[in-house]
Image (tube, rainbow, N blue to C red):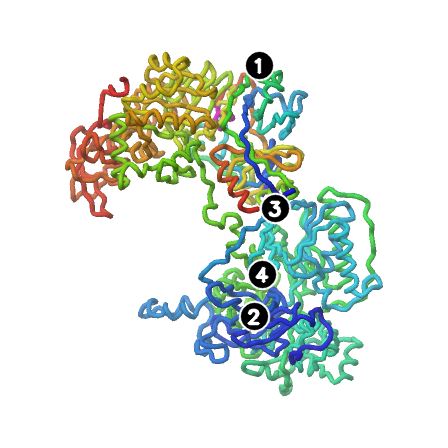
Amino acid sequence: MTARFRNPTGGSVDRSRTCRFTFDRQSLRGFAGDTLASALLANGVHLIGRSTKCRRPRGIFTAGPEEPNALGTLDPGDRQIPNVPLTVAPLADGLVFASQNRWPSLRFDLSSIAGVAGARFGAGFYYKTFMWPAWRWYEPLIRGLAGLGCAPKIGVDRPPRERHLDCDVLVVGGGAAGLSAARAAASRGAKVVLCEQDSSLGGELQFETATIDGRASSRWLIDSERELRVAGVELLTGTAVVGCYDDLLLALCQPAGYPGEADELLHIRAAARVLATGATERAIAFAGNDRPGVMLLGAVERFAARFAVRAGNEAVLFANHDRVYCAAQRLREAGIRIAAIVDPRARPELAVLEELERGGVRICNEQVVEQVLGGHRVSGVIVRHRDGVGTPTRISCDVLGASGGWTPALQLATQSGLAQRYDAQLGAFIPVSESATVIPAGAARGKLELAAALADGTAAGAVAATAAGRDAAPAERPALVSADPAPAVMPFWRVVGGDEKRQFVDLQNDVTVSDLRQAVAEGFREIEHVKRYTALGVGTDQGKTSGLPGAAILAEFLGKPLAEVGVSRPRPPTRPIPLGVLAGFRGAPGTVRPVRHTPLQADHVADGALMEPAGLWLRPRYYRDHGESLAAAAEFEAQRVRAAGGLFDASTLGKIEVAGPDAAAFLDRIYLARPSGIGIGRARYCVMLREDGMVLDDGLVLRLAAQHFLLTTSTHAAAAVLSHLEYHAACSAAELAVSCTDVTDAWAVIVVAGPRTRQLLRKVLPPAQWREPLEQLRHMDFHCGKWQSRPLRLLRASFSGELAYELHCAADAAPPLWRALRRHGAPDGVIPYGLEALDILRVEKGYLTSAEINGQVSPYDLRLDDMVKRSAPCIGSGLLARPALHEPSRPILVGLVAADATARLDAGAQLIAAARSTQSLGHVTSAVWSPALGRAVGLALLAREFAAHDREVVAADPLRARYTKARVTAAVHFDPTGERMRL
Amino acid sequence: MLISCPFCGEREVAEFEFRCTLEERGATAAERLYFRLADPRRSLEHWQHVRGCRMWLELHRDLRTGRVLRTASVPVPPADGTGS
Amino acid sequence: MKAVEILVEEVRCHELVVPVSRLPAAAAPGAEPPGSVRRYADGAAVLHVGPGRWLLAGHAIERESSAVVAAQVSGGSLLDVSGKWLRLCVTGAQAQGHLSHFLNVTQVLHGRDCAPVTILDCPTLLARRERGFELWTGRSWATWLHESLTRSR
């Protein structure tokens, strides 16, 4: 059985495939090829939701993505998709969807009491109401009522889809102008991509009856599509270009028409772009123009032409242009009786008018629709003379098609940087085409007639191809067209003298003419301010049908010309994009940032390490076998290192090889401590400064050859140090010949520390090569050799204060070396240790990390005065001489020991003189519980004037109410002479 | 926005990192720090192509529009020149 | 043939670096165009990956010994960075399509056969090869990058 409002023939729906769907628990039927909106209208359903603020009953307004009213929730439940425009969503069998913004139901909506009150809620009501006695009283109710649709509880499990496209010419829009532009560009040899947001090509051509080149426009469409495919043009339907960002265009491909699994984000780089985005029909403001059954005229035509759906049986048409008469003819042929055509202009000289009148259509020129009658559906209109002369007439109807003309879709042109110009004939703004690479074409440029659009498109395609560097001889084809005549629009924005509180400008946000008048009365003058104050055009439709009428009405109230007032600036995206689509490949867990592994990752995991992110790296914090808790394991590991030995993976250290004829001179400019003085085969602890004299990083410099050095940096500073070196090599030291290469990943670094390490290394390293070096290496010496035919550097250096060696091993050979060390070390009690134990050991010895080198300290603050004295003039040494760096209030590095053996020191605690003091003298930079001393120790930066030895201070953590008494000591707590290192 | 790297060609601006704006040469430190007059039409800046070839670039930018007017690799001084 | 296949390979590498101030001017006869790649039958390759920076993969140092010596004479250095680079070979009919998910391959390889890029935030050298592409990436990044590229096929 056919639905009541479906014509038996016509349209492009597939009548052989019935689709059952449910709307608000009502079972209905439609055909494949329908949208949800057309299927509802076919069944005579017009009430499909309620408005946000006033909860007024609303119906379907347009037939496309610019829909402000007909938003529904698909698949209600935990996975629902809210705010789906019903005019775009294709119908499928079994779809379930629900209306929004109503409770308990669409017909009996209690929240429409707000509608009665809503009349009192003018523009900006949220600045003026719900304040007394307290916002909290109203908040739960408002939160329940506010908003548009409800978000799902469970996200769509969407595989990320992103694609980068490259082409010569991108054509946005697959209508008459777009298709001819694509053909013109392709015939010149350009690589063309065409994006059309609808699921099929053609734009307005799908609904107009015209003849092109002797063929019906529908035939011409099919032929054009085929020709373009043959010419190699990539035709993307269901793909909307949502943003123009300088040289990049973002497009959203949504084959389903609403958020779904197949959504794809396209990054398009095009040498030239043709913006054939068409023109959007706009509304007129008259009282009651938000009733279900009031639609845009073009929408009524579209439902009839494309879906064979009659939006009603008896229509009144209200428009200010000549096209309304052709539209009336087409609608009559579709079976809709036209009760009246209301046209505020004088009667035009068109033959079709007589034909219509013979057919019983009442033509009311110089008249306007004053008011729409009806509750949940239009039941009639009141028509009167434009100037109020004479008596008003009542005309019955069940659908009203209104049209105020067309607004060129300027969003992408404006985002691309084109200026706008007001065209008084069109009553709209059109883009000014000044750029060779951004070319608006067709209706988007104000060429509403089909012949003009085709010609404009062809010309635009040629210009675009030339701009992209393609100039093959074109195959020109003049298109002979007979179609609808020029519309001859007379700008008409609102009916003067009606009830302004019921004349809606922006349907989605319930912005009325009276709101605009109120905004002007309250002093708003700029369109951008009025937009934000009244909420005009801030909805999901972005004011596509309401923006220009709103600006024009504002201009009228301000007494300024519309050209001066302008429209608010459109910003990307021009269609809503689901955040998951924007996230692309970063959407899935674990993919937001890369994870860097050391070569020993697998071994750490096998050894039971708790791996922790440190920047992008994963590093072992402690090994679970060593204790029940973090603290217990760390203590065990630290004690064992000092008692026997430990292995540590320091591969994350930044390593940079500096080579070139002037390498030594270059490093003298970078570091304090004069690296040119290091002997070959020796290393030195050096510190580099920023340009302002503060410490940037510390590390070891190894001299591999006369002009070949290896630098180590701290893990977190590796990237910054490399850029710093490269910058100065290129700029301040540009006359020096030097290269810097990052080799962090080339070398694994295994630290072997503790009293038994030398005997361990004797077992692991082949004696033929390594016995002598092991015996003879002094502190800070290194020896290059091989292990299992891979390069190995053995450096004697210590970060734990114990006898220690660093094995710099080629990264691919590190796992076998580690395992050999583990195997041979186990009988001696040598265990692997993690970051926590490392921290204990180094704090006990007063060694520095980024906790102390925090970017705010000078080398003097870190007690590196000797190093400064020994340096050549280097980067930062100039500003290092500033008197301010020697003030008594500057911090200096000290050690802290907790007074009480059970007390706890926390890094970050502020240091104060006594318990009640509120003046901070410095802060604790690092703190650990020291097994060697049996109490908490730490390092701190304390104001120089208070940093006397043995002074009592309090480490204060007010947030946790912890105040720990501590004593100031030297920064070294354990083995101050360093004899354990020199065993 | 695209920046034309002399080595890599045209690349997205997100691949580059700004380091500093260059001051007028020849003025004293005090003048450079406290008395400079910023000219938004032409800003001379040092950027690095960090997420590409890592070379250093000198960009002339118009700060009013954000557009890059000229891109060059950081100039190498003549052999007898001294660094500042 | 599978649509996309991604394999990880260990390759011995050297880097040849020449200080920028010692490079011949861009137009001079000795200068090489940026992004050029020379490949040899046994899989060795030389990739020009940055100003004054070449990646010599496999046994390329033997093939290019005269070029290396010339570079060293003008102040360059040959660094053994074996272990630093892992090579991900992306082959198959859909190789370019798969990589186009992450970056604009056409633009990045415009007029050249290799280019330093960033894919999914990992520093990578992208190079064209027969029947697909190579992604050279640092060892520490390779596991995650390989997983991410494979997961999204």
Q: Which label sits in the foreground, 3 or 2?
A: 3
Question: Which residue has dot 4 on it?
Answer: A567
Residue A913 at x, y percent in the picture: 18, 38
Q: Which mark is residue A513?
A: none
Chain name for mark 2: A
Between the C-alphas of marks 4 and 1, the distance is 66 Å
Confirm whether circles 4 and 1 share one chain. Answer: no
Image quadrant where one finds the C terminus of chain A: top left
* Res A923 visible: no
Compared across the picture, whether A608 is left or right of A210 comes to: left
Q: In the image shown, does A856 or A206 lie closer to the viewer?
A: A206
* Res A983 visible: yes
Instruction: Please tell me whether residue A214 is drawn above or below residue A882 in the rendered image.
Output: below
User: Dots 3 and 1: beta carbons under 8 Å?
Assistant: no
Question: Which residue has dot 2 on it?
Answer: A70
Residue A719 at x, y percent in the picture: 45, 33
Question: Which residue has dot 3 on it?
Answer: A164
Q: Residues within 10 Å of mark 2 (few under 14, many from 20)?
A: many
Amino acid on which disc 3 is placed? His
Between the C-alphas of marks 4 and 2, the distance is 25 Å
Q: Residue at x 47, y 16 (%)?
A: A707
Chain name for mark 3: A
Confirm whether circles 3 and 2 share one chain. Answer: yes
Compared across the picture, whether A230 is left or right of C134 comes to: right
Q: In the image shown, does A536 or A574 lie closer to the viewer?
A: A574
